[in-house]
Amino acid sequence: MNPVYLTMLLLLCCIQCAAQRPQWIANPPKPADTYYYRVAEGQGKTDEEAVRKAFIAAIRESSFAIGAKVNLSELERTPADSTLVMLASAIDIPINKVCYYAEPLITSWGYRAFVLCQVAKPARVKPNFKQFSCYLNREEE
């Protein structure tokens, strides 16, 4: 197959995948008074592993952003079969995973996942997180 056609086909596939992604990936919701929204990305051999890695990335990025201490080596050593609730309980940041989206990787075997999390602005103070509609891309009243 001609390399130019192969490149064009790959580009069209990428555009199609990006067009089907939820709005919150490119445009996270506006922050509330006591929390903000963070989108994080992860990759793994399965979609569950990719979501878990994306959630760990959200925790890591949020800890740096709000100045909370997180034992990153312990977080990375958490067993692969641990639930996201167990991961969140091992840290000192109120964080709430509200949406996730996983897609197969185009150029290699595996998955890419995105998670949308609500993260408390002041560390250690759990805000009253509102319900978020992943489909409507807004908080529910």
Image: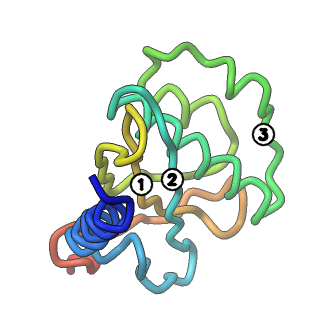
Q: Nearer the viewer, mark 3 or mark 2?
A: 2
Residue 70 has which mark?
3
Residue flagged by tag 2: what amino acid is it?
Glu
Question: Does residue 131 show up?
Answer: no
Q: Position of residue 131 (x, y in %)?
A: 27, 66
Q: Position of residue 137 (x, y in %)?
A: 25, 77
Secondary structure under badge 3? loop
Q: Which residue is mark 1?
A: 114
Left/right of residue 74 with respect to residue 99 in the rendered view? right
The answer to which quarter of the image holds residue 76 is top right
Query: Is 54 drawn above or below residue 71 in the view shown?
Result: below
Question: Does residue 31 show up?
Answer: yes
Q: Which residue is mark 2?
A: 41
Q: Are marks 1 and 2 in contact (CB under 8 Å)?
A: yes
Q: Residue at x 31, y 47 (%)?
A: 102
> In this figure, what is the number of numbered marks?
3
Quadrant in which the C terminus is drawn: bottom left
Lower position in the chain sequence, tag 1 or tag 3: 3
Left/right of residue 80 with respect to residue 1 in the rendered view? right
Residue 56 has which mark?
none
Lower position in the chain sequence, tag 1 or tag 2: 2
Q: Residue at x 48, y 63 (%)?
A: 118
Left/right of residue 14 with respect to residue 79 in the rendered view? left
Crowding near the residue tagged with mark 2, few <14, some 14–19, many ≥20 C-alpha atoms within 10 Å: many
Q: Position of residue 119 (x, y in %)?
A: 56, 62
Residue flagged by tag 1: what amino acid is it?
Phe
Q: Spatial distance from mark 1 to mark 2, Cα to Cα?
A: 5 Å
Q: Are marks 1 and 3 in contact (CB under 8 Å)?
A: no
Residue flagged by tag 3: what amino acid is it?
Val
71 or 77: which is nearer to us?
Answer: 77
